[in-house]
Image (spheres, helix red, strand yellow):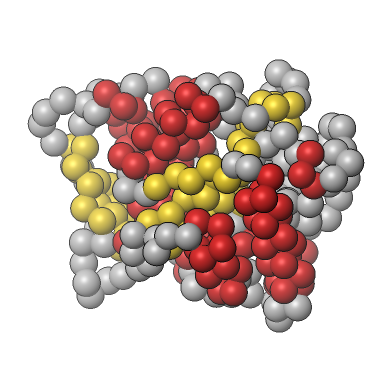
Amino acid sequence: MRAVERALWAPSVHNTQPWRWWVGDDVVELYADRTHHLVGTDPDQRDLVISCGTALHHLQVALHQLGVPTVTERLPDPENRDLLARVQPTSGPIEDRNAGLANAIERRRTDRRAFAGPPQPAQLRRLARHAAWCGAALHPVLGVTAQARLLAILGEASSRQREVPGYPAELAIWTRRYHEAHDGIPPEARTVQFPTHSLRQFPAGHLLAGPRPQTALEDTATLVILTTDGDEPLDWLRAGEATSAVLLVATQLGLASTPLSQATEVDHTRRQLAHTILGVSAHPQIIIRIGLPIDAAELPATPRRPLSSILLPRG
Ligand SMILES: Cc1cc2nc3c(=O)[nH]c(=O)nc-3n(C[C@H](O)[C@H](O)[C@H](O)COP(=O)(O)O)c2cc1C
């Protein structure tokens, strides 16, 4: 229960927290909560499953910190595709690579401000190793030409999405929650003005964005694209686990991060990412913006639903 409670700090698209958990004596099951599917924003339910994958990885990391080695079955029941994962304790050693990562769970934030500089190449290599352990590849987009192309694709995704029925309504619903809501993106997590064109345009919030670059290319963040070999729900789940690993390791390294999913939500731009940026047959799942935070002050945490409201009843 303690580990599940910590897994609730995982990031999710629009902070929808689209998961349900069942906790038995020696098993934890993770279910997709499709009532929180963003139909206009995320037509394939890719983000929904990626979000659940981030929570699955958080759970594993939290259990490992408690000294519990785990074995995970992904999509174990072909008759029930809502059951995304079953995690059980096992004998054997704890995976070293997760050591210390749990300490980043409560400290990690989605940072939508300007960044103060890019990550070091060695840090990017470390993030890539963690993504690979989870079954995804991390491609940093480096070089002015590739970056300019990627920014154009992000801009295109943004303008195409504005025309998608339901998208503006979902954006409004999840950014204008009622007082004391336990989900959605509060104004404290949104910036007063946009520091770069690469970010999703949420309604203005309270956070000071930091210095605004003259051109989009002057954003000092590095954008990385996570890909998987396949493009099925199992791949999305693994991409979510890799996203969590990258974000937690980045936090551990003192780096700021922003998951960016618009270009992978829109079919056309997802294909463009694969063909014009990556030139590989792998499937882009999410983009992550990584860099140095503009200051050391901790950003406020976004709210989460309490454990009691996401647990499925026993029996
Ligand atoms: C699959 C996925 C897609 C996301 N897409 C975006 C995005 O496009 N833009 C953005 O600013 N944040 C995005 N986020 C971050 C969420 O909005 C964020 O995790 C949530 O509001 C909770 O806040 P926290 O990460 O600070 O705990 C995404 C997160 C996930 C897991």
Residue 124: x and y in percent read 49, 32
Q: Residue at x 50, y 56 (%)?
A: 278
Residue 28: x and y in percent read 28, 47
Between 195 and 220, the one nearer to me in the picture: 220
Indicate whether 120 appears above or below 204.
above
Between 107 and 314, the one nearer to me in the picture: 107
Is residue 170 left or right of 70 when viewed as pictured? Answer: right
Q: How many marks?
A: 0
Indicate whether 14 appears above or below 172.
above
Q: Is residue 304 visible?
A: no
Q: Name the image quarter holding the N terminus.
A: top left
Q: Quadrant of residue 126?
A: top left
Q: Name the image quarter holding the C terminus.
A: bottom left
Q: Quadrant of residue 262?
A: bottom right
Q: Residue at x 58, y 21 (%)?
A: 254
Residue 206: x and y in percent read 85, 40
Is residue 310 left or right of 26 when viewed as pictured? Answer: right
Between 221 and 210, the one nearer to me in the picture: 221
Q: Residue at x 82, y 42 (%)?
A: 195
Q: Residue at x 89, y 41 (%)?
A: 214
Indicate whether 94 appears above or below 39.
above
Residue 9: x and y in percent read 52, 39
